[in-house]
Image: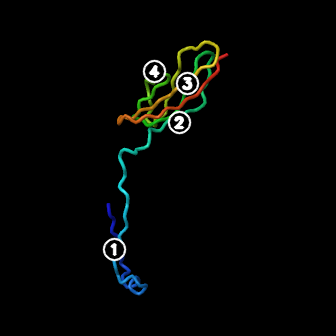
Amino acid sequence: MVVVVALSLAAYFASAGFGGRTIAAEAAAPDPSSAPPPLLLLQEPVLHGRIVEVRGRSWPNATVMVNGLSVPAIFPDGSFRYFMPALPAGSHAITVTAQTAAGDTKTVRSSVVVQ
C-alpha cells in the first residue's frame, strides 16, 4: 500500500531544495494472520470454602472455559464470574482459555490451595 501525501506548501519545499515534488511514504499493509490473541485478564481466585470463584475479563463475544468447562455467561463488558465445583483440600491448577469466533485462543494458568 502506498500513501501519497500532497503538500500545499509547495513553494516552501521548492525553496528548501525539494523542487515542489510530492512525497510518497510506504506503509505496510496489516497481516491478517498476525491478529492479536483474544483478551484474557484474570483476577486472583476467591475462595468460598471449598468453592473457587474465578473472575476475569475477555472480549464480550469470546467463548471462555475454566478447566475445560464452559463459562455460561459473559457480561456485555466482557467480564465473567465462574464458580468451580467444590474441590477437595489441596493445591489445584486453574486453566482459563478464551477463544474468539475466528478461532484465536489465549490461555492463562493459575493455582489455588483449598484448606
Asked if the residue at tag 3 contacts the one at tag 2, i.e. Cβ–Cβ closer than 8 Å, the answer is no
Task: Find disc 2 in the rendering and name its residue.
Answer: 41
Asked if the residue at tag 2 contacts the one at tag 4, i.e. Cβ–Cβ closer than 8 Å, the answer is no
Q: Which residue is farthest right?
A: 115
Asked if the residue at tag 4 contacts the one at tag 1, i.e. Cβ–Cβ closer than 8 Å, the answer is no
* Amino acid identity at mark 2: Leu
Quarter of the image where one finds residue 8: bottom left
Query: Mark 4 or mark 1, which is nearer the start of the sequence?
Result: 1
Q: Residue at x 46, y 21 (%)?
A: 68
Query: Mark 3 or mark 2, which is nearer the start of the sequence?
Result: 2
| Cα distance between the residues tagged 1 and 3 | 56 Å
* Amino acid identity at mark 1: Ala
| Cα distance between the residues tagged 1 and 2 | 44 Å
Q: Secondary structure at mark 1?
A: loop
Q: Position of residue 90 (x, y in %)?
A: 64, 16
Q: Residue at x 41, y 87 (%)?
A: 15
Query: Mark 2 or mark 4, which is nearer the start of the sequence?
Result: 2
Q: Total marks drawn?
A: 4
The circle drawn on residue 83 is none
Task: Find disc 1 in the rendering and name its residue.
Answer: 6
* Amino acid identity at mark 4: Leu
Does 90 sit left or right of 24 as displayed?
A: right
Task: Find disc 3 in the rendering and name its residue.
Answer: 94
The circle drawn on residue 69 is 4
Q: Secondary structure at mark 2?
A: strand
| Cα distance between the residues tagged 4 and 2 | 18 Å
Nearest-to-viewer mark from 2 and 3:
3
Query: Mark 4 or mark 3, which is nearer the start of the sequence?
Result: 4
Q: Does 114 sit above or below residue 27?
A: above
Q: Does 51 sit above or below residue 16?
A: above
